[in-house]
């Protein structure tokens, strides 16, 4: 037998990308009675303490009843942290009809260390500060126990982990059909466990969730514009009642010593019909206090006495006091004084403008519309 017959010869090669580790093949001539290395054991007994971290994954037996060549396949696998420092692949994942940026991390580990529960779906990608890609902002979307394509199984498992970004990936704008104001919409992927009640905040942000499977949901944020007010001019019908300007009493003296009185009512003409209005519209989260238009209630009054009759049609007016005196020279009536007061209407003249509001539920809050009309010139 040659002097180096029992001298092992070892060759190596890197595991195929994206797997991290080194595959070794050691060949040696052994005796029939030599125990075979154990699959899953280390190469320390074969090659010494320096190989205690190299795990046996395959052994070929020598020919029966003869000396032969023993071939041992073994691997050195870096720690998970060491693998994650460089092992990542860019890809994309289709979710809900949209494509999300993703990375795949393939981790080689002992079968005894593999756990279906850890890392959990939705957990954060460990941050590895490499300067090129640190993994921040990604979460575990799905896992699979993948085939390695070489003889790693059953000693090792390849845990292929796909992580997707947690940042909002889809941003769009659209005109609000009700208000005409542009709305901003964003969508992001979130774990189903984080689904909350749909909300509307005071800033006009509406958040809704749509669960797409047992693990994931789409979070949609829509901004309804709580700060912008839409303003336009419209034509509406409005009524402005007449206003009493005053009453003039004209006296006509008779030849018999008496006199006749003829009241003249002077009015500012009212207006009823279409006119321009300024309209302001906005959205708010809380229910508004609606403002009614100011009421202008016209009232008429009448006064009758032997001297004259007064008939004032419905109008706005101040308090009106009518005093009639039948003097001593009256040929018919004795000396008499009569006074009648008619109270003022709720408003006595047109205000410079009138504003009122109305509201309707919309997008989790309320659309408030304010109308302002100016008094006729």
Image (cartoon, rainbow, N blue to C red):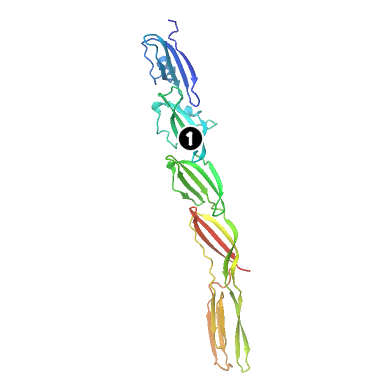
x, y (%) of residue 61?
39, 14
- The one nearer the camera, 47 or 313, is 313
- The one nearer the camera, 201 or 57, is 57
- The one nearer the camera, 216 or 124, is 216
Question: Quarter holding the C terminus?
Answer: bottom right
- The one nearer the camera, 146 or 315, is 146
Query: Is residue 352 at least partly visible in the picture?
Result: no
Question: Label 1: few (<14), some or many (≥20) within 10 Å?
Answer: many
Q: Is residue 285 above or below residue 41?
A: below
x, y (%) of residue 14?
50, 21
Q: What element carries label 1?
A: strand
Which residue does the numbered mark 1 point to in the structure image?
163
x, y (%) of residue 55?
42, 20
Q: Which residue is drawn at 58% across and 60% down?
A: 279
Query: Is residue 369 at least partly visible in the picture?
Result: yes
View extreme (top): residue = 1
Q: Is residue 74 above or below residue 294?
A: above
């Amino acid at each position: 037998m040659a002097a180096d017959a029992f001298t092992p010869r070892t060759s190596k090669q890197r595991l195929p990308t994206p797997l991290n580790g080194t595959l070794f093949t050691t060949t040696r001539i052994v005796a029939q009675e030599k125990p075979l290395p154990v699959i899953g054991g280390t190469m320390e007994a074969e090659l010494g303490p320096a190989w205690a971290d190299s795990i046996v994954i395959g052994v070929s037996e020598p020919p029966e009843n003869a000396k032969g060549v023993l071939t041992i396949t073994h691997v050195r696998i870096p720690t998970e942290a060491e693998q994650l420092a460089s092992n990542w692949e860019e890809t994309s994942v289709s979710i809900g009809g949209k494509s999300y940026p993703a990375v795949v991390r393939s981790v080689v580990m002992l079968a005894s260390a593999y756990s279906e529960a850890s890392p959990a779906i939705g957990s954060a990608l460990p941050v590895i500060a490499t300067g090129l890609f640190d993994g921040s902002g990604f979460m575990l979307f799905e896992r699979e126990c993948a085939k390695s394509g070489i003889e790693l199984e059953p000693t090792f498992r390849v845990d292929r982990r796909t992580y997707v970004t947690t940042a909002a990936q889809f941003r769009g704008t659209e005109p609000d059909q009700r208000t005409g104001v542009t709305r901003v919409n964003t969508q992001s992927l979130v774990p189903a466990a984080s689904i909350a009640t749909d909300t509307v905040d005071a800033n006009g942000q509406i958040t809704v969730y749509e669960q797409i499977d047992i693990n994931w949901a789409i979070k949609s944020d829509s901004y309804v514009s709580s700060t912008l007010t839409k303003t336009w001019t419209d034509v509406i019908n409005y009524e402005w009642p007449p206003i009493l300007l005053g009453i003039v009493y004209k006296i006509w003296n008779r030849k018999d010593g008496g006199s006749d009185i003829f009241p003249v009512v002077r009015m500012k003409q009212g207006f009823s019909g279409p006119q321009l209005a300024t309209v302001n519209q906005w959205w708010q989260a809380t229910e508004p206090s609606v403002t009614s238009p100011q009421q202008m209630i016209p009232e008429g009054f009448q006064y009758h006495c032997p001297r004259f009759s007064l008939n004032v049609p419905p109008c706005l007016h101040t308090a009106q006091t009518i005093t009639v005196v039948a003097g001593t020279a009256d040929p018919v009536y004795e000396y008499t004084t009569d006074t009648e007061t008619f109270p003022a209407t709720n408003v006595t003249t047109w205000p410079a403008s009138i504003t009122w509001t109305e509201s309707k539920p919309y997008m989790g809050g309320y659309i408030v519309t304010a109308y302002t009309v100016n008094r006729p010139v």
